[in-house]
Image: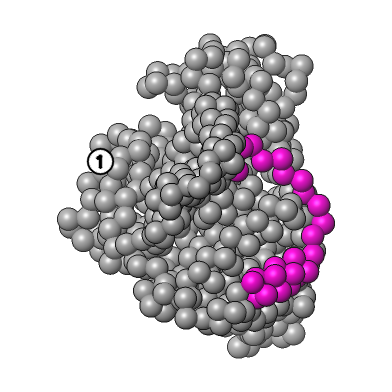
Amino acid sequence: MRLGVRLREAVAVTLLTFLVVATTTLTHLSHLSLVVTREADRLAELIARQIYAQSRQAIAAAPSDDPRDVLRRDREVRNLLDASVGYSPQLVYALVADETGRTLLHTERDKEGLPAPLYPSLAALTDLDPVSRFVALYEGPRVYESSLPLALNGAPFGSIRLGVSTTLLRRELGASLRQSLTLAGIALPLAWLLAMGLAHLTLRPVRALAGQIERIRRGEFGPEQTAEAGGDEFQELSVQLQQFGRELHADRLATLSERAQLQHVVDKLEDGVIFLSREMTVLFFNKSAQDVVGRPLEQAVGVPLADLLPAHHPLRPVVERAVDGGVGFRNATLALSVEGRRREYLASAFPVENAREVVGAVVLLKDLESIKTVQSLVSYSAKLAALGRLTSGIAHEVKNPLNAMMIHLELLKERLVDVPPEVQKSLDVIGGEIRRLDRVVQGFLRFMRPQEVSFKALDLHALLTSLGTLVEAEWQAHGVRVVLALDPGLPIINADEELLRQAFLNILQNACQAMPEGGQVTIATARVGTEAIRVSIRDEGVGIRPEDLEKIFKLYYTTKADGNGIGLSVVYRIIQLHDGAIDVESGHGRGTAMIIKLPVRSGA
């Protein structure tokens, strides 16, 4: 009778152990399968949105062409499709189809132009219960799709579809499945042997193991802990469960690491991106959006947007419209207060739907200052092109008559005998004005004439040293001295030596002219990261008034009585031709510093 009771106790303990191990294993596999499918869906959606953005950009660049032809010939869209399959380990294809379902672009070229077959939605796979999802993954090779609709002028245009293979998803689950089955195979016979020898202590070890499993469930992965009572077998089982917990913890850390990598990529975007839940709590945003939110990401995740933005904030009503009403909008101009300064943004918000239910929203913010900067450069280039068309006419209509006037003036001087002083003075004035006008025309032609840029290896220090010696020799009598502070580690750059010589000489001449009482001109160089160098030319002159700082590079703007306003415009254009940048630091009466940044590989 007693043996029968021990046997029944052993069976009960074994069954209990089996249930514990099986439940833990199934829970782990269910969670892992859900993580894998959700990660595949999320990555596919992210890639689809990238393809969507590139497709919209390609279509917008050629509004008069058929959008289908634009997409077929756009190399960037095709490259992005091909790269997406290589980037994601689960994707087997990516395609763009029109509204009839016919394939426009496909990573498998032979399928372009054919009807694209429909496959089950990948998002629906994540919504299945654990058993159904597990069966769907292992019942055979199948393909699930993640699809993003394309719209043109508010009307459906087509869709972007990405195929995910269950064979590739199973590959990620295989190692964990084998490990779980191995653990279950070890745990069951071990439990039977432990139960036979320690049946009278069954209850206490089981309770201890239950407590340990609870700690694992809560995520407490501390040092190995053993059961309070029982033999070495139960202690071994406790160690195995702790090992299982640490592996589960490692899987979670791997998921967090992948999320961190994604965040690193999104943080590189110039546009701000904010993801919100259905309850309008913050899920994620990148660094570009941090200034708008007003808090670091670590402090804002899970916080309602209403607690981060004041009630009158312009962004709140448009986000609420996207979440509550399910209506997106694009490119609304909003004036937002960022770091105490009002800045204009182009804001777009889109509801995120799952099975026709809004589950959140994504907000995109584009800083208009960068857009205005580009527009300013385009406007500046357009003005230069317009002026360039006048150059040839000016050369013939102005320069040639000036030459003729100067020649006849000299002939007139030779023929006149005993010229009265007042007549001689008038002749000198005429000659001086003709020469001044000729200098203005020559300067205009130098500025507007198309530059033949010849990029060659250039030792910038040798160029600056020779210019410093030349300028100091010319201005030494006026009390000007030139000091060089050159970085010996500066690399050789690719540049046009003659154009840079002209630019730096113009800046040095301006610096000397700004010091009528004499002073020091400092030429300094330094490395900026690995891809750029900085040249600064600083004087101790009269400086530039704040209201004039933004005008000094404009054509014909000058504060000198005898200036023509061309010199610094020529400098600006030369630096532009080298893909560089020029900045000014100055204060009235405190001198001026011209700071030029040039790329190391300029013109390579």
- Residue 406 in the figure: left or right of residue 226: left
The prevailing secondary structure element of the residues shown in magenta is helix
Q: Quadrant of the N terminus?
A: bottom right
**Relative to 278, residue 530 above or below:** below
Decide if residue 372 is in sight here. yes
Decide if residue 130 is in sight here. no
User: 47 and 60: which one is in front?
Assistant: 60
Q: Residue 545's spot in the image, x, y percent?
A: 35, 67
* Residue pictured at 69% horizontal, 16% vertical: 112
Q: Which residues are magenta?
A: 446-474
Residue located beneath label 1 in the image:
321
Residue closest to the far bottom: 228
* Residue pictured at 47% horizontal, 81% vertical: 517
Residue 268 magenta-highlighted = no
Q: Residue 313's spot in the image, x, y percent?
A: 22, 55
* Residue pictured at 79% horizontal, 60% vertical: 458
